[in-house]
Amino acid sequence: IDEPTISMLFTINDSPFFGKEGKYVTSRHIKDRLEQELERNLAMKLEETASADSFLVFGRGVLHLAVLIETMRREGYEVQIGQPRVIIKEIDGVKCEPIEELTIDVPDHHSGKVIEFVSLRKGNMLTMEPKGDVMHLEFEIPSRGIIGLRNTLLTTTQGEAIISHRFKEFQEHKGEIPQRINGSLISMENGNAIPYSLNNLQDRGKFFVTPNQEIYEGQVVGEHSRPGDVVVNLTKAKKQSNVRSSGADEKIKLIPPQIFTLEEALEYIQVDEYVEVTPENIRLRKIHLKEHERKRAKNAALA
């Protein structure tokens, strides 16, 4: 059995919607369920943290732990998950990280783009051979580089890439890998996402929430079109004045929101964000829900 390559923080749901959708919400429930999983999931490891409400779970990749989270969710658990982190080991005084063998079969005309994306994430090409009109590519790539790569490749190749990867060995740390550049759009208020506000803020970025969906302060409701986080108010309704102007009440055309699967959400979040998983919803949120708390945490990190 391969050893774990990534870790994720599992913690209790402390959002304003805590306990609304799930049956099992306390840290005792989560701990018992994770310990039960250890008995049959041999590649998984569990560690307690300084906080009684949080647990570090180690697994063999995002998908391995996403299957566990999805199972827990269907059983009625509410849990929050931190950003997946790759396990860094020190071997003979050298900082080492897990390296994986990545195999991609892709139509010939997309192969250039695929090689470019994988190289950006410190991928090293080992084999490139044509099989009919399909190009067979093999790479060595750090596990960090694979997090979030699948979505990018499937979008680029219009869903035609066949991707598989498996753990190979620990090698010397490969240096920085570019992360998501765009910031998040964060909700300012508790309430419902009003279509009027969604329409007015469409040029700020793309949204992850549907019209009239219930949201809360500190929830990540979209992706900013530029770097840096922005706080937006989606709960603001249109002022009902007595004055009418022609063309003011044209039909609102909303761009459909991006709805994440569990695995996509885990690969998408930044260090200061959680994925809130309940039996009915998958939401993204900031660890600190209040704006002043986020500023304080950012200043403390810089100090």
Image (cartoon, grey):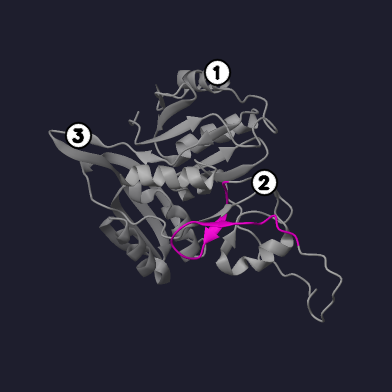
Q: Residues within 10 Å of mark 1 (few under 14, many from 20)?
A: few
How many angstroms separate mark 2 from mark 1 (CA)? 29 Å
Total marks shown come to 3
> Foreground residue, 270 or 239?
239
Q: Which image quarter: residue 153? A: bottom left
Residue 198 seen anywhere in this rendered image of the structure: yes
- Vertical arrangement, residue 52 with respect to residue 129, above or below: above
Q: Residues within 10 Å of mark 2 (few under 14, many from 20)?
A: some
Residue 216: x and y in percent read 64, 45
Is residue 103 found left or right of 261 in the rendered image? left
Looking at the rendering, in which quadrant would you find the C terminus?
top left
Element under label 3? strand
Q: Disc 2 or disc 3, which is closer to the eye?
A: 2
Q: Which residue is mark 3?
A: 90
Under mark 2, the amino acid is: Asn
Under mark 1, the amino acid is: Arg
Numbered label attached to residue 190: 2
Element under label 1? helix
Mark before the other along the chain sequence, 3 or 1: 1
Q: Disc 3 or disc 1, which is closer to the eye?
A: 1
Q: Residue at x 64, y 59 (%)?
A: 257
Write the start and end of the magenta stretch as one range: 218-237
Q: Which residue is mark 1?
A: 28
